[in-house]
Image: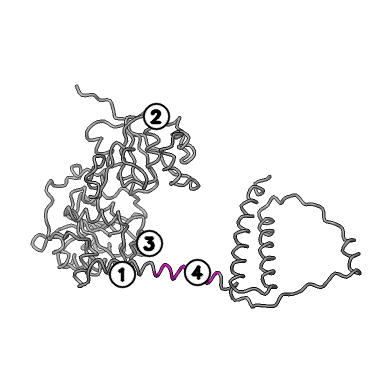
Amino acid sequence: MPDKTPLRVIFLADTRPGHYHVAQGVIAALSRLLPVDVTRIEVQRKWIVPTRWLRARINAKSFYPPRMLRMAYRIDAGTIPQADLVVSAGGETQMPNICVTRLLDVPNIFCGSLLRGLEPDNFSLIVSSYERDEGSDKHLVVLKPSSIDPDELGRPKVVPRFGPDNRPRTLGLLVGGRAGGVHYRDSEWEALLAFVRDVSKVWGTRWLISTSRRTPDAVADRIEEMARDEAVVAKFIDFRTAGPGTLPEIFARSDAIVCTEDSSSMISEAVSARLPAIGVSPRACRFTEDEQLYRDFLMHKGWSRTVPIADLSPERFALRSRSRAYTGKSAGRARAEVEGAPAGIVRIAAVRRRYLVFLLLLFARCLRRCSCWISLPTTPPISAPPITPAALPLVTAAPMPRPMAPPTIAPSWAEAVSGFAAARVIAIRTQGVSAMDRLRETTNCMILSLVLLGFSSSWLRIP
């Protein structure tokens, strides 16, 4: 008789849905094999604790998991139940994953790429989606796990291939928004919605459309207006009112999925549901190195394809749906070679342009901050009038002020520090020094003012 004892799993979740949905996919896969008892613990690192320091403490001899959990993540080790496995995803969960694993002495699974300085030996299994990890014994290179079960959705075992001769009757459109290096113009949103109407007019295809938390309100309102035509939109799910968890309904009824390129999670979930997935990208589309590797991995396996929004048309979409998109190169390299320029030169030129713009903006910001001091007129030193014997009685007869206690409110300290900085600026104005000396002296004043504010912070807490 099989053992019915559930597998006790501690699920460490951060605040990003794209991360904890992947970990939930791993737990869902385990639940298909045996009963699972999951304890979810929210992870949120204190902003004052640097990740570099945490990585250094992992391998220290004085490493004590309960202390690190309490100091860095506000997790009381005494409240953590006994478990058989620890599962997490996302960089912020790596340290607590290691801490809980060493505390309970159990295996652990992490989903994602490791932070610099962490060795794979800290984990029992690393679920990765990057082909660079295929040679490691600790890594399992697969599609990003998803909790959506295609069998429960009634998806066919064999994914059909659509094209001019086999047009889909129902298409799903997952609309995202601005994220990271992906930015959409208003004209691109208009082009995407025009493409939706053209496909319905030419093919007779109806759409199932869903927005996300990143979708601009103006775009969602346009889709809602378009959804009034039932010949174009069979159903519109507005995230603002429906909330998360609506994708399974679209996956169950769609023949293929069109998804904006800002979210790899939506594309991965569509692929996991055994659906053809096609991403539509804006002109301003730039991924991180890891994200670009994952997109290339999806195209290399033939699981997804990409079409620029500017090139969308029913004819182009049909050809893209039928043909294989991967050519051994990323989308940027293929585009560069088509235009006749070597891919390496185009990539280097793009990097140089970005850094040049960054340096120019940084220089302009510094120049704007310092222009008021550089433009000060150079004036001869002002000599103070000498003190005559007649003035001495006035000086000595003045009563000395009584010593004052340190102020207990922030405005007094701010005024004191600002007054000190202003006095130094006045001293600069009254001396015949060069512009560079003025700039150097002003910088020193700013640094000293910040130091004084730092030392005064303890006084601000006095009742």
Amino acid on which disc 4 is placed: Arg
Image marks 1 and 3: residues in contact by CB distance under 8 Å: no
Whether residue 234 is visible here, answered yes or no, is: no
Badge 4 marks a residue whose secondary structure is helix
Q: Which mark is residue 349?
A: 1
- Return the residue nearer the eye: 25 or 420: 420
- Return the residue nearer the eye: 77 or 352: 352
Choose the circle earlier in sequence order: 2 or 1.
Answer: 2
Badge 2 marks a residue whose secondary structure is loop
The residue indicated by pointer 3 is 217
Q: Residue at x 69, y 56 (%)?
A: 412
Badge 3 marks a residue whose secondary structure is helix
Image position of 193 (left or right of 406):
left
Q: CA distance from mark 3 to mark 2?
A: 43 Å
Tell me where the magenta segment starts and ends, as one range. 356-369
Q: Was residue 365 drawn as part of the magenta stretch in this picture?
A: yes
Residue 441 image offset from top left, x and y in percent:
62, 66
Amino acid on which disc 1 is placed: Ala
Q: Residue at x 68, y 61 (%)?
A: 420
From the viewer's perspective, is the residue at label 1 or at label 4 nearer? 1
Could you classify mark 4 by the number of other residues whose Cα lies within 10 Å: few (under 14), some (14-19), or many (20 or more)?
few
> Which image quarter is the N terminus in?
top left
The residue indicated by pointer 4 is 365
The residue indicated by pointer 2 is 81
Residue 170 lies in quadrant: bottom left
Q: CA distance from mark 2 to mark 1?
A: 54 Å
